[in-house]
Image: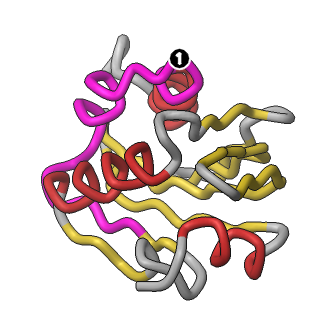
Amino acid sequence: MAGSPTALDVARTYFDALAAKDFGTVAGLFAEEIAWHQPGDHQFSGVRHGSDAVGQMLGGMMTVSEGTFALELTGPLMVNGALVAAPIHFSGKREGASMSQDGVDVLRIDGDRVAEVWLYSSEPAAEDAFWGAG
């Protein structure tokens, strides 16, 4: 299968698109039945199933953060089979609040799609406070 994208290729495309706020490309990389594990105790916490539900959640995050939510890689992508771990920094601002912290995103790649995502935050309480109660 020469020419098929590797897990690293898919993850690199995903993070490049996130950094560029190219959400069309991001959404196009989601498997139809993606599972998204959002940590914490806030309005976006929990597991979302399906690309539509994940897209709505990400749109909600952009709305709450007044379009300022940003994510960037802070180190190399690390691959173990179909899993890719990414050290990241994410931030956002809204009326009366801001957040800026490190984290780790873990993606499970299936073929040329992101099939599952687990997020880890370095300051969960600060992230909860920023996003607000569910």
Disc 1 marks which residue?
20
Residue bounds of the magenta highlight: 17-36
Report the quarter where the N terminus lies. top left
Residue 33, picture quadrant: bottom left
Report the quarter where the C terminus lies. bottom left
Q: Left or right of 16: which side holds 126?
A: right
- Front position in the image: 93 or 83: 93
- Front position in the image: 38 or 12: 38
Identify the colour scheme used: secondary structure
Q: Is residue 32 magenta?
A: yes
Residue 41 lies, with reference to residue 104, above or below; the image says below
The percent coordinates of residue 36 (x first, y second) are 38, 66
Residue 90, picture quadrant: top right
- Residue at the (46%, 60%) spot, across then down: 117
- Residue at the (62%, 35%) spot, across then down: 70
- Residue at the (14%, 51%) spot, across then down: 32
The percent coordinates of residue 29 (x first, y second) are 30, 34
Report the number of discs: 1
The percent coordinates of residue 97 (x first, y second) are 70, 58
Residue 73, picture quadrant: top right
Q: Left or right of 128: which side holds 22?
A: left
Q: Is residue 22 magenta?
A: yes
- Front position in the image: 64 or 4: 64
